[in-house]
Image (cartoon, grey):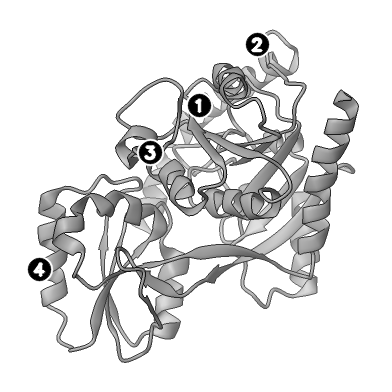
Amino acid sequence: MLLKSFRYLLFPLTLIYGGIIWLRNKLFDKNIFKSASFNFPVICVGNLATGGTGKTPMTEFLIRLLKNDFKTATLSRGYKRKTTGFAIADDDTTALEIGDEPMQLHKKFKDIIVSVGEERVEAIPQLLQQKPDTEVILLDDAFQHRQVRAGMNILLTEYANLYTRDFILPAGDLRDVRSSSKRADIIIVTKCKADLSEIEKMAIISEINPLANQTVYFTSLVYGKAYHLFTKEIIDISPDCGILLVCGIANPRPLKDYLTKHADTYDMLRYADHHIFHSNDLTDIKQQFDKIKTNKKIVLTTEKDAVRLEKFAQELTTFPIYVIPIEHAFLFNEAEKFKDAVTIFINSFKKSIN
């Protein structure tokens, strides 16, 4: 509550920052600032807020949807990587070279192209030059970066923090103005409760007030079975298991809610989003783990954190550290409708080229 009150005191700064963002968007809208479009299927996944809406799981959903029918590539900026410029992941690539989220995609989907580049307007031609058989590019977290005009924009907003109820930074979490939502083709309300009612669905759609060409979908998060970081052994999370949750993600609340339902108690070591783990963190984890007074106990982490912990293979191979995967599940039986919209876009775009 104190933090919330403090953020409201920053509202004058929000007005200044919001004015700058508004002006920037107007300059793009009037073509004073230039946006590049490509004669090629480009799908952007993004949000208006700072992290925590489920962009990477949505990118994974799209990869699973497309990779068997289209030569699929992802392009991210590679946040917090130690390199610069354009790069395509290969067998020797590490998370430090491309960032944790691209590395997560690279490890899970060996049959797609995973690339990074800060300047997407330059990276897209480089990607197509090096991988000319590419048939669709997924831009991860690029909605607010308007130098590229994607053919399809998918905007995510979290059920517990809809952009319609939020403020511009620093008073709120928005990094773009609410009116930018009009540039989206699809709006997805993520992290919904699984039993969201039809009445609440319609109320949220009314609040979002989509344009005639926009479609609103709703998803919840589904957690898969936890697997060991190195041995890939699968376990069930049971109430009698002592859990130390280790995570450096923007919004761990859904995972905490999941553990509250499936475990009697758990401890947590929380780090900043995209935290790069060091040896002293490993010491803290082991010390905190030792404090759990039960015979059956594990360390649990997210897939994004897992790619940053893999460098400690020597220390953790025999340690009970498990990874819990997440996926989006479309509510109201609308998964096929969403899939059709995406594939029709790609196919119609390809037809327009021929």
Q: Amino acid at mark 4?
A: Gln
Disc 4 crowd, CA 10 A, few/some/many (<14, 14-19, 20+): few
Residue matched to label 2: 33
Report how far apart the C-alphas of labels 1 and 2 lie in the structure.
18 Å
Q: Nearer the viewer, residue 226 or 155?
A: 226
Q: Earlier in the sequence, mark 1 or mark 3?
A: 1
Q: Secondary structure at mark 3?
A: loop
Q: Secondary structure at mark 2?
A: loop
Residue matched to label 1: 17
Examine the image and state in which quarter residue 73 appears: top right
Q: Nearer the viewer, residue 269 or 126?
A: 126
Q: Earlier in the sequence, mark 1 or mark 2?
A: 1
Q: Secondary structure at mark 1?
A: helix
Front of the two marks 2 and 3: 3
Q: Is residue 51 above or below residue 77?
A: below
At x 89%, y 27%, the residue is 352
At x 63%, y 18%, the residue is 23
Report how far apart the C-alphas of labels 1 and 4 lie in the structure.
43 Å
Disc 3 crowd, CA 10 A, few/some/many (<14, 14-19, 20+): many
Examine the image and state in which quarter residue 199 appears: bottom right
Disc number at residue 99? 3
